[in-house]
Amino acid sequence: MKQAFFSLICFLAFFIGSLAQTAETFDIATFQPPKGWQRQDKGGVVIFNTSDAQKGTFAIIMLFASGDSSGNAKNDFDGDWAEFIAGQFKVKGKPAFEPIEKKDGWDVISGGAAFENELGPSAVILSTYSGFGKTFSAAAVFNSQDNLPAIEAFAASIKLKKPEAKQQVKSNLPAGNQTKAASNGFAFTTSNFDDGWNSVVNEDWVEVTKGNIKVLLHYPNAVTGKYYPDSDEGIRAAWNSLIAPRYDNLQNYTAWFSTSDSPRPYVIAGELSDKQTGKRVYVVLFQKGNTGWIEIISPDKNTFINNFGVDNTTLNNYPDSKLFASLEKLADYNKFAIAAIDLKGKWSDKFSASFFNYNRSDGQYAGTNTIAIVINFNFTSATAYNWDGYSTNNAHSAGAAKTFKTKGSFKMINNWQMQFSDIQGKPKTYNAYFSCFKGGRILWLQDRDYNGYAAYGKVE
């Protein structure tokens, strides 16, 4: 059994092979189905199965719908193993791996483990293919060597269609300005947006590029995260913390803010030399409301103005509120996809608000109404969760509290949407994404029955 088990790993690592004319297709795969096996299609998964009641044997082959790759075959494999194997078959052992293979442009990683189920000792193999911006997985579960020939023939018959590769935006920035993505243990570290901007997670910022413009979405730090009642002091602190350490030879420095617009916009700019490359660039540091400090690096001032329409040397104290829309939008590129394996643990959203009540008739104060809500998602595996909610409504010192608890299974519909089996008595679908801060991420969820996203921080 052991010898056949590891032999199968090798066979599954060569999924992209050829036999005769393939008869069926699923997603990006074509294949010759095993003769006499039953086929089931279950929303994103194709299953072939066979069994022999007299011998007590069974075998299952599964093909899982393709998704967006994290860019790393091991991360893709780990995500699918957690979701499809450990989650569904309760396999607790760690997989044994074969070396990563390069097949027809795909990085193929295969791993397997032995486990126990109600039919006795069984084995499971998962092979994951990563390439061309996509990932695809296939698995086999069996408890007898009798079905190995059919599994091997099926494995050899599979061919994968190469998706059209996403066009990569070539940066015109000097090579020294390109930075390496920081994963911090998460599957997705890059995002390619339809409008041509591309984001990469880094240790101290999210780097966003398009053409010859680079943008750094700075994470808050001890200096920039502090409240400054004096705007001039706040501007100096931000510039000295974020810009000055990486540049020198400052010329044509200008700093502008408005006291009439709320939230208050800040635009600080100057021509500098990049200490790493020596290249002269035009740097703008911008903030308005919750954007955080955004650094825009352009080859020159005209390039910046042509792209964003803002020249802080011409602004007065009463700017058009729409003027900064293109700069504010840059904050939205701190957005990254989610893999189920990223979610394990407890994520919490806490909200509170107070409302001051006054009588319509005489305008007299009529008390305060305070509402507090706590929502927790505890992801116990890549497919299971516990959900609980707690709310209080304290009106006129007469408090009312409610507690809700449910649990069930969840699945990633895609890397930006997730579905829960039970939230307060009914299935729920949420739009979802991560945003980054230094050393961690915030989970943003939007119940598709309502508007607006809620932010969840990981608490354990």
Image: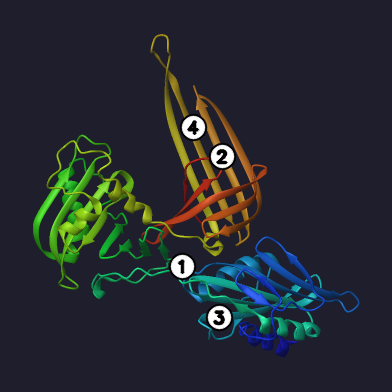
Check the image and report above or below for 352 versus 206: above
Asked where in the image residue 13 lies, by quadrant, the reply is: bottom right
Q: Is residue 210 left or right of residue 270?
A: right
User: How far is mark 2 from mark 4, CA to CA?
Assistant: 11 Å
User: How far is mark 3 from mark 4, CA to CA?
Assistant: 52 Å
Asked where in the image residue 147 lies, by quadrant, the reply is: bottom right
Asked where in the image residue 211 lies, by quadrant, the reply is: bottom left
User: How far is mark 2 from mark 3, CA to CA?
Assistant: 46 Å
Q: What element does badge 2 sit on?
A: strand
Q: Which residue is mark 1?
A: 185
Q: Which residue is mark 4?
A: 371
Q: Which residue appears farthest toward the top when viewing the image?
A: 361
Instruction: Work out whether residue 95 can be spotted.
Output: no
Q: Which residue is mark 2?
A: 390
Instruction: Say which label, 3 or 4, has the lower sequence index.
Output: 3
Q: Quadrant of the N terminus?
A: bottom right
Identify the residue at image location x=61%, y=85%.
14
User: How far is mark 1 from mark 2, CA to CA?
Assistant: 31 Å
Q: What element does badge 3 sit on?
A: strand
Instruction: Say which label, 2 or 4, has the lower sequence index.
Output: 4
Which label sits on residue 108?
Answer: 3
User: How far is mark 1 from mark 3, CA to CA?
Assistant: 21 Å
Instruction: Work out whether residue 309 can be spotted.
Output: yes
